Amino acid sequence: MGELPFVTSIFPLGGPIGTRTTVELQGWNLPGQELAVEAQNQEAGVQFLGVRQGECDSNRVPFAIDTLPESREQEPNNAPGTTSSSRSPSS
């Protein structure tokens, strides 16, 4: 049977609709450390991701697809003058 692939975590945990998101994978016996998630024609909600190693499929982990904007933390940001700005979505 061999060693089964197992995903322990992903980052980021979600992405916006209409984009391609590169997801970092952590786990054992994985075929790579990144996975591209295409959300071009997806609806908002949870999609389950998994990978395949040889003839074995990994466990599936949830990935949120949403209409809200995404933003990653940028360093340096430890002082009031170096914080990242963000806007709340308008209704």
Image: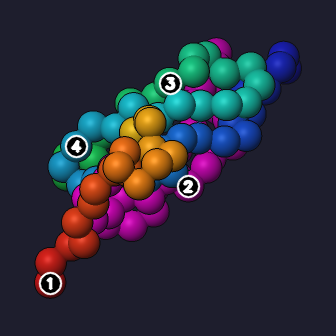
Q: CA distance from mark 2 to mark 3?
A: 15 Å
Quarter that holds the C terminus: bottom left
Q: Which residues lie in the magenta part?
A: 44-72
**Which of the marked residues, 1 or 4, is nearer the chain's N terminus?**
4
Identify the residue shown where x is 22% and y is 66%: 87
Percent of width and height locating residue 38: 30, 40
Tag 3 and tag 1, C-beta contact below 8 Å: no
* Number of the front mark, 4 or 2: 4
Specify few, some or many for label 4: CA neighbours under 10 Å numbering under 14, 14-19, or 20 or more. some
Is residue 6 shown above or below 79? above
**Which of the marked residues, 4 or 2, is nearer the chain's N terminus?**
4
Label 3: which residue? 34
**Which of the marked residues, 2 or 1, is nearer the chain's N terminus?**
2
**Which of the marked residues, 3 or 1, is nearer the chain's N terminus?**
3
Label 4: which residue? 19
Q: What amino acid is found at the position of numbered circle 2 in the picture?
A: Pro
Specify few, some or many for label 2: CA neighbours under 10 Å numbering under 14, 14-19, or 20 or more. some
- 34 in the magenta segment: no
Quarter that holds the N terminus: top right
Label 1: which residue? 91
Q: Secondary structure at mark 4?
A: loop
Q: 52 and 80: which one is in front?
A: 80
Specify the quadrant of the image occupied by residue 27: top right
Label 2: which residue? 62
Locate residue 84 relative to residue 78 in the image: left or right: left
Q: What amino acid is found at the position of numbered circle 4 in the picture?
A: Thr
**Which of the marked residues, 2 or 3, is nearer the chain's N terminus?**
3
Percent of width and height locating residue 47: 45, 56
Q: What amino acid is found at the position of numbered circle 3 in the picture?
A: Glu
Q: What amino acid is found at the position of numbered circle 1 in the picture?
A: Ser
